[in-house]
Image (spheres, helix red, strand yellow):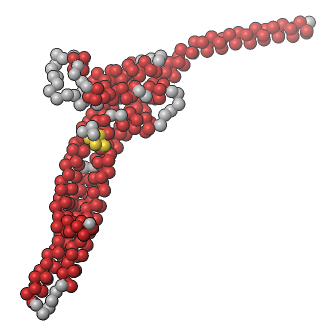
């Protein structure tokens, strides 16, 4: 069995490497484009959410109920977001309403659309209503991991797994090149043992086969190094993981801003609402102190007289 594997790789290792690098380049191109589209979409989301929060702050909007305010803010942001993952051939005429466009969406398409993103945030409403500051990194991870457009390529292949494979492929090609070199040498050395110096013609054929095997060994190393350099260069020039990390950080920052906005405004509203009551209580206490002081003064005057 091992002999068959060695013979196969001894003949077709470079071809196998070519197929692997072709698949890797295809997946890399699709993953990078996918990540750039996600970056554009989530950047749009973060801009709209930040703009909505800024607008509310300028208008001095009061927050009486965090849950209602959260739904109101997300609803306004939702109206400004572009659709995602809509069915092919879907009409997008200007006179078509949002409700009309929603007709014909499957559940899977709905979850992958902008409505799914907003629903993911709304599902974490308990975090936003709580006074305890959450771990915003974990919150963002939960929100975004529920979005198949973010976490999967073609809604099937985990994109994080693809990026990890692409990251290790340069090293794997170096290993395959070295592997091919050893295979070539192991196939060449036995040929030397067969050389019969008394028969120069046969020895020449044997030597030629030895050179072919050694040449194969060198070619696999060269191919492995070349493919490794190619993928390393692409990973450096257009990194998928860094693009996704930047997108993740943008969403994390805007969710953190949303939480602080809701709680800062609510605390401010609560303080303003309770201020008259506090003032009234303070006035009553001061009046009671004044009355007690007058009564005490009268007693002292009576004692003195």
Observer able to see residue 225: no
Across and down, in percent, residue 281 comes to 65, 12
Residue in the image at 21% along x and 17% along y: 100
Q: Is residue 94 left or right of residue 154?
A: left
Q: State the image quarter where residue 90 is shown.
A: top left
Of residue 273 and residue 138, the one placed in the foreground of this image is: 138
Q: Is residue 265 above or below residue 234?
A: above
Q: Is residue 147 left or right of residue 84?
A: right
Image quadrant containing the C terminus? top right
Q: Position of residue 289 (x, y in %)?
A: 74, 12
At x 28%, y 29%, the residue is 108
Q: Residue at x 22, y 64 (%)?
A: 224
Furthest residue in direction bottom, as rendered: 198
**Residue 185 x/y as whole percent:** 23, 76
**Residue farthest toward the front in the current orientation of the protein:** 1
On screen, residue 172 above or below 202: above
Determine the residue positioned at 24% across, 24% down.
Answer: 105
Q: Quadrant of the N terminus?
A: bottom left
């Amino acid at each position: 069995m091992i002999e068959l594997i060695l013979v196969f790789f001894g003949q077709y290792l470079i071809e196998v490497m070519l197929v692997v690098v072709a698949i890797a380049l295809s997946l890399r191109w699709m993953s990078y484009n996918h990540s750039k589209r996600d970056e554009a979409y989530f950047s749009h989301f973060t801009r709209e959410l930040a703009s909505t929060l800024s607008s509310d702050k300028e208008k001095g909007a009061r927050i009486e109920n965090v849950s209602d305010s959260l739904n109101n803010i997300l609803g306004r942001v939702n109206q400004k977001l572009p659709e995602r993952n809509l069915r092919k051939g879907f009409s997008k005429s200007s006179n078509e309403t949002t409700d009309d466009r929603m007709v014909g969406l499957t559940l899977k398409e709905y979850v992958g659309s902008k409505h799914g993103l907003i629903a993911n945030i709304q599902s974490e409403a308990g975090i936003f209503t709580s006074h305890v500051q959450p771990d915003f990194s974990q919150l963002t991870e939960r929100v975004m991991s529920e979005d198949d457009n973010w976490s999967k390529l073609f809604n099937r292949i985990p994109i994080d797994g693809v990026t990890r494979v692409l990251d290790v492929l340069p090293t794997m090609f170096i290993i395959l090149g070295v592997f091919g070199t050893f295979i070539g040498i192991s196939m060449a050395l036995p040929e030397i043992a067969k050389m019969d110096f008394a028969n120069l013609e046969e020895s020449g054929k044997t030597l030629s086969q030895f050179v072919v095997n050694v040449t194969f060994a060198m070619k696999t190393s060269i191919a492995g190094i070349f493919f490794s350099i190619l993928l390393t260069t692409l990973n450096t020039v257009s990194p998928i993981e860094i693009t996704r990390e930047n997108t993740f950080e943008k969403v994390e920052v805007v969710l953190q801003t949303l939480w602080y906005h809701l709680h800062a405004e609510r605390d401010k509203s609560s303080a303003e609402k309770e201020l008259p009551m506090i003032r009234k209580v303070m006035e009553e206490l001061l009046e009671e102190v004044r009355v007690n002081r007058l009564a005490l003064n009268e007693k002292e005057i009576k004692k003195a007289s």
